Image (cartoon, rainbow, N blue to C red):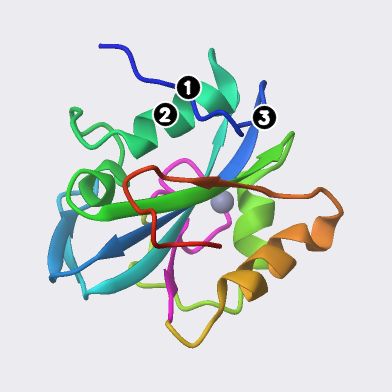
Amino acid sequence: MSSATHPDCPPGPGAYVVAIAITAPLAVRLRNAVAARLRPGRYLYCGSAYGPGGLQARLARHFRQHKSIRWHIDQLTTVGEVLGAWAIAGGDECELVARLGFLPVPIEGFGATDCGHCRSHLLRWPSRVSARAIRTALASGGEAPVWLQASATPGFRA
Ligand SMILES: [Zn+2]
């Protein structure tokens, strides 16, 4: 199955923050089989892509709705609406979590199974927090985040 890479996505490896909106309560499952519930709203997932295909391949996967469930975050991107993503060439996912530390943690341990220090790689994005505030926080390390608009959501701009 091929998937188109986003025209604005930087080539090579890096870190990213995917923005997802869910419109109904969503039960998600962690690797230890504990189920948790996400309420409707917006969420941000911090990840990194240092394998083959880098950011382009990984974000194309996150933007694709139909796929097998491999990572925790797939439970959101297959059901919710992926709004888009900020990509940072050469970035570090845990550093991005730290920069977004003012956001609430919805589920302890989500996406952080292999990470020894973050409480979660998934954060809740309350409606009172603007996209500009997220962008500014992500840019605080110096690298400029590149916003990748998901094609399915023409009304959303970050
Ligand atoms: Zn981490």
Mark found first going from the N terminus, 2 or 3: 3
Q: Residues within 10 Å of mark 2 (few under 14, many from 20)?
A: some
Q: Residues within 10 Å of mark 3 (few under 14, many from 20)?
A: some
For image coordinates 31% across by 63% down, the residue present is: 21
Residue bearing the label numbered 2: 60
Front residue of 25/64: it is 64
Q: Identify whether 3 is placed above or below 92.
A: above
Residue bearing the label numbered 3: 10
Mark found first going from the N terminus, 3 or 1: 3
Residue 116 makes an appearance in the image:
no
The reply to whether discs 2 and 1 touch (Cβ–Cβ < 8 Å) is yes
Q: Main secondary structure of the magenta part?
A: loop
Q: Where does the C terminus fall, quadrant-wise?
A: bottom right
Q: Describe the element under mark 2 as helix, strand or loop.
A: helix
What range of the chain is rendered magenta? Answer: 111-126
Amino acid tagged 3: Pro
| Rendered location of residue 119, percent (x, y) | 49, 64
For image coordinates 18% across by 31% down, the residue present is: 66
Residue furthest toward the right? 142
Q: Describe the element under mark 1 as helix, strand or loop.
A: helix
For image coordinates 31% across by 37% down, the residue present is: 71
Residue 42 makes an appearance in the image:
yes
* Total numbered labels placed on residues in the image: 3
Q: Is residue 30 magenta?
A: no
| Disc 2 from disc 1: Cα separation | 5 Å
Left or right of 97 in this view: 1: left
Residue bearing the label numbered 1: 57
| Disc 2 from disc 3: Cα separation | 12 Å
| Rendered location of residue 44, percent (x, y) | 45, 60
Q: Describe the element under mark 3 as helix, strand or loop.
A: loop
Amino acid tagged 1: Ala
